[in-house]
Each structure stands twice: as C-alpha cells, then as structure tokens.
Amino acid sequence: MAALYGGQAVIEGVMMRGAQHFAVACRRASGEIAITCEPVPKIFRPQWQKAPFLRGVFSLADAMTLGTKALFWAAKQASDDISSVSGASGAAESSAGGKILPAIVSESEMKNALRTGNASSKSAGAADIAIGSALVFGLFFAVVLFKVLPQFAISLIQWKYNLPTYVMGILDVFVRLTIFMTYIMLISRMEHVHRVFQYHGAEHKAINALEAGAGLSVATARDASRFHPRCGTSFVFIVIILSVFAAAPFYSLPIWYRIPIGLALLFPVASIAFELLRLAGVYRNNPIAHLFSVPGMWAQRLTTREPDDSQLEVSIASLVAVMNAEKSDGNISAADEPEAAAVA
C-alpha cells in the first residue's frame, strides 16, 4: 500500500505528517514561508501500536500531540511577526509570491533559539508544559461539550416524556450533531478561523493532488477537491453515530452511570471509526466505503473553505518537506506505514 499522508491546518499554515516525520509550513508577514521538519517521536512508532483496532486510539493521541505542537510553533511565528511589525512598522508586507526560508529548523534548534532570545533557559520546559496543558484543556472541553452536555439534554427530555429507547437514540444523534454543527458555524464567523478553514482546504487539495498522481503544483492543487474522505470532520461524524449505537443499551440507566460508560466506550468506538475512515480513504471508489464518508464530506463544507494560491503554496511546501524527509530516511519500510496519517 502507498504511504498515507495526513495533516491539519494551523495559524497561517499547514502541518503534514508522514511515517517518521512531520513538517509545518507557515506564511510569514514578509511573504516568506517558514518551515520546520522534525522526526515523529519514537513513542508513536512501535509496531504493536499499528495493530488493527488498536492503532486508532494511538493515532488519535499522536495526532493531538503533534497537532498541538504544530499549533504552538505556528503561533510562535505569528508572535514574531507581530513583534517585528511593532518594532519596525511597515517592514512586513503580505505577499502571495514569497520565498521559502532555506533553513529547516529542528526542535532542538528551535529550543536553543528560545534559550538565547528573550526567553529564559526554562522556555523549552515551559513550552512543553503549555502543550500538555492545552491538550488536557482541549480534551476536557471536548468531553463536556460532546459527551456530558448531550447526556444532560436527553436525560431532561427522557425525564419529562419517558420516551422509548429508539427515540432516545434519534434524539441523541440530533442533539450531538446540533451541538457540533452549531459550534463549527459559530467559530467559522471569526476571521482568523475562516483563514484556518482555508488552509484546511489547501491541505486537502495538496493531498488529493498527490493521491491522484497529478503532481504537486499550485495548478494541480487548485483543480483538486477541497474535500477528503479521510478528514477528521468525517471521523467526528462516524464517532457520533457509532457512539449512539454503543450507548443505546444504557439509556435506561441514570445519567451518572451513562456518562462514565460513554467515556469508556469512546475508545473502542474511536478505534472502529478510525478503521472505517481508513477504508473509506483507501477504497474511495468503492460505493460501500464511499457511504461511510458521505456525511463527513458534506460537513466539510463547513470546516473547509476554498484557499487562494498563496495558501496552496504553503500546503505544498509542507507536504514536499515531509516527503523529502521520508525519502532521505533509509530506514523506512512498508512496516512504517503512517497509520496516524490515515486521518487527513
């Protein structure tokens, strides 16, 4: 099987992930594209983590950790731009045809730069703590918004109307999807989130162009679809639907039982959803596999926007960087297939 590449949008850029490396490319205020490319931490690469129905959980942990790390790096670039603009007004200008910075910055170099700059010698440790805190907060927010809140809502309805189980299931799907779609629509009204959604579309277009064998260029990416069956949005949709089926036998229990049961079921549900999403991406022309990706592909109309050429250039730069890093690593084999990149 050909290697699968995945990624995510970040602030003014895109992160791309391969088997053993990940790269982040960001458009700077000067018009240049800053790139960092690092090896994936070995903790995410043991072979036993790649077993079917086990790889899904570890892939999610992988994606969250690397994604948060990429977001922090992108935020650092944006912060540097703000500082440079405030220090020298008019020095930075927006440009669609900026050049790519020649340096590929490693994690150790980035941390050394922090130590020798305005930050203290504890900056690297503080950054790690910040990344960990962001992950914990993100998980807590997601659990409250998409697990706890829906359970309280349907419990109130059940308490008042005493509905049968199948109706509870329908309500559960409706409540969860309503919360998810409302959240996406609200944040999409923010200008900076709109640009992130454009970079999300640029990420999909670059990967679609690569997987179609069309070559990697702004022209081929522009003609590619901004929707991808392996998108994380599709993953969320599958998880929501499967969670309802998994929770159906427990609707008669009190809410203080249902919430921890629902959290425990999240791991097997996520594993199954991951396998279905992966199959939908690999066999994207199969009508049965396509069926699993249709709801998520529709939802991507909310989480992606059409990118401009400069954003496509950033996405391609990130993908090319990680592909070059993978090719230069002589230890990559078929066993190193990037399972975490199965979500695009």
Image (cartoon, rainbow, N blue to C red):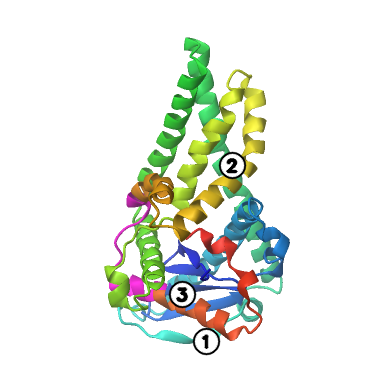
Q: Residues within 10 Å of mark 3 (few under 14, many from 20)?
A: many
Q: Is residue 121 magenta?
A: no
**What range is drawn magenta here?**
300-315
Q: Position of residue 22 (x, y in %)?
A: 56, 72
Q: Nearer the viewer, mark 3 or mark 1?
A: 3
Q: Nearer the viewer, mark 2 or mark 1?
A: 2
Q: Which is nearer the eye, 16 or 31? A: 16
Nearest to N terminus: mark 2 or mark 1: 1
Element under label 1? strand
Nearest to N terminus: mark 3 or mark 1: 1
**Mark 1 highlights which residue?**
103
Q: Position of residue 238 (x, y in %)?
A: 48, 43
Q: Inspect this view and state whether residue 27 appears.
A: yes
In the figure, 86 relative to 249: above or below?
below
Nearest to N terminus: mark 2 or mark 3: 2
Q: Alpha-carbon distance for marks 3 and 1?
A: 16 Å
Element under label 3? helix
**Mark 3 highlights which residue?**
319
Describe residue 194's horizontal placement relative to residue 142 as left or right: left
